[in-house]
Image (spheres, coloured by chain):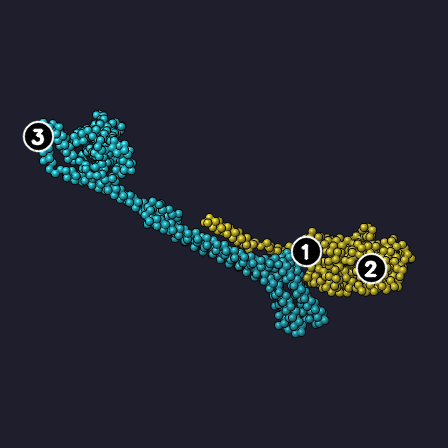
Chain colours: A cyan, B yellow
Amino acid sequence: MNTIQKKIFSLTSVIVLIMMGIWIALSMYISQTHDQYNAILQRYLVLNEVNEESQDLIMDLNNYLYDPTASNLRAIDERELKIQNMENEIWDLGHSENEFELLNYIHLMDSLMETVERTISLSNQEESEAAIHEFNDATRIATYISDTKTALVETELETYDVVYRGIIARSTALNRFGIWLILLLTATLVIFSYLLSRSITRPIIQLTEAANTLSQGDFNKVVTVHSNDEFNFLARTFNRMRLNINNLIQEIQEQAELEKELKDNKILLQESQFRSLQSQINPHFLFNTLNTISKKAYLEGSEQTSDMLVNVADLLRYNLKSLDRSVTLLEEVTILERYIAIQKARYTERLIFLEDIDSTLLHVQLPALTLQPIIENAIIYSVEPREEGGKILFSVKDAEPYVRIDIEDDGPGMSEEKADKLLKGLLVPKEGHSTGIGFINVVKRMQLFYETDNLIHIESTLGKGTKITLYIPKQRSLKANA
Amino acid sequence: MNKSLSILAVLILSVLSYLTYISAESVINSDWKEPLPLMSENQQYRLVLITQDVDTPFWNSVAKGASELAEQEGVMLENLGNYGKNEEAFLSNLELAIHSKVDGIIVQGLDKEKFKELTKIKAAFYGIPVITIAEDVPIEESLRRTYVGSNHFKAGKLIAEQLILDMGDSGEVAIMYDQEPQHYQSLRLNGIQAVFRKHPNISVIDVRTDTSKEKVMATTQNLLNNHPEIEGFVAINSEVTSGMIQEISRRKQIDPLFIYSFDDHADIEGLFQQGKLDAIVAQDPEMMGRLGVELLIEWLEGKSAPLDFDGYFTPITIVKVKDEL
């Protein structure tokens, strides 16, 4: 894994290496140029030195001629030895371009020395005129040496002209190279430092953005960081944290929902129990009283009244049983019939109740007191307010996998909006239910019992009537069974 | 935005790299090659060709022939010369060559005391063989090994014969040469006179002149004043030809006159092209150069010693204007 430290370190070491390379190359180049300069200078110096020595030799000879002492002679000998030694150096300066002049130069020196020797020996032999003649020759030879030196230097200049110009051109080229190199290095450095800094700051910005998003409560956005260093690790950790938080939140939400449902259930149950408790005031007394009245009516020959009282008592008993039990459809239909019998006694001809029941379907389970509140609604809204009364149709039919129960009246009906509100429990119906259980209670209990919505449908047309359809699943879900 | 930035960065980088590379290349590359070092073991002969008048067609040809052969034979040949017949510089070149102990000297002969002293005493003292070229100095006076060049006596004869052929064998002919004729001039003169002696009807007028142009013109003017009937002119020293012709053309028509000279001066070719000269003696300078170097090498290698003291003559021809055209 590439660490930030490694990145910075490698950038620095590359820079240092490049600088070192340039420094080494430059110093090598400069020392090479120096050597070249020195070699060239040396050539001129040697050439010139020989020339000077030969001029000095003439001077020494002149001194000797005027003053022939041993010390002057020794000076000449020393000078000649020096020149002879230098001849070897001159040899080394030779190349194909200056060969002729160089050989001339060497031979001229030989000639000079020979002439000097001759002058000395002539002078020793007291032949002064001949000696002076030789001396003049020597002087001329020295002049030739001087001329040849000039010619040699010229040849050198010509031969090395290219070199000198090359050196000048190279130094300007070197300057130019230096400028370009500095520009190149600067550009490279700027670009690489930019890349490096961006490789550090970009993940930070991305992380910052991600943190911002998280802090604003959006836990769904994946944190992406394009990096291969520590930031990648950081981003992954960040991501994991985000996922964890997300999971936790989801769990909390689910739990809250569950709790709410539970609470709803409890409230519903409490309400039912409260109502049943309300109506449970002295039930045994009521039953006993009702039974006594019934027997008395029977004994007094009012069979009808007696039946009615029995019905009322049954209804009451059924009603007082706990609501959170399931009953068969048969039980429901039986108690419904009792209730209708009571209502018939009340509304006589005004209530027409028609039923169409498929008796094979009566075994299905459903919450207690599901049908009675709906029928009661129908009576309250469609029969009671109308003088001419109303008609209620009750049918139980097979609609695989459901048992379909239709309760239809020919009352004033209601708007679709109102029906919707009714289903959602937004419409609080007016009081007056005999059992104290309203339509909404039925809806909710159905939902809890089957853990499914949409089991109750309201179909209503204003002025024509209302049809409420219940779909009772033949099989309760496993969960509900458990 | 980002993309264009990176493209720009890459562009800048590549341009800079390219420029850096180019300048680095120019720093590293230097096309100079060290001249070959001297081989002291393998010493070639060092010969010099010393002339008085460099950069004239004649002497350029001599030098060309000589250096061609020198290159072919693998000997070193240096051409020492000066401009405009500077005798002092010429002689000091000769002395320098002698003191430099060259292996052989090919020199244009100069019929002067100092020249003779140098060749006779100095060169002999150092044992350096001297060959005269184009112009000779007699062997008794110069101790030269041999002479390479035209046979000037024969050249004189050729010119005289041509003159007679053109002009007929009667008339006045002026022969112009130096106040102190050089050896080669004397030979040419002798050649001419040898021919004219057989034609008594031709009267020969000897004219001696200095070589400076004013003097030549003055002399010519004098000549034309004294001998208005003169028909033929021979310039033995080709150097005087142009001055002579210039003066003649001021006085007379050039065409009917018969004017002759030799080809060893820079002015001659131009005058000849213009048709002012009737004929010239053409020498073979390139051959002279070649032969000079060849003989010197042979002598140094001891192949053909002794050399022919009389000299080795290179071919000469007479060239007429008509031939050229």
**Res. A1 in view:** no
Question: Residue beneath label 3, please?
Answer: A296
Q: Quadrant of residue A430?
A: top left
- Which chain's residue wears label 2? B
What label sits on residue B76 in the rendered view? Answer: 1
Task: Answer with mark 1 or mark 2, whichever residue precedes in sequence.
Answer: 1
What residue is rendered at 69% in x and 67% in y? A140
Of B157 and A396, the residue lying toward us: A396
Disc 1 from disc 2: Cα separation: 41 Å
- Circle 2 packing at 10 Å, graded few (<14), some (14-19), many (20+), is many
The residue mark sitting in front, 1 or 3, is: 3
* Above/below status of A217 relative to B88: above
| Element on which disc 1 rests | strand
* Quarter occupied by residue A393: top left
Picture disc at residue B245 = 2
Q: Nearer the viewer, residue B153 or B84?
A: B84
Q: CA distance from mark 3 to mark 2?
A: 191 Å
Question: Given this view, does label 1 or label 2 mark the residue nearer the observer?
Answer: 2
Q: Residue furthest bottom?
A: A67
Task: Check disc 1 and give the amino acid type.
Answer: Met
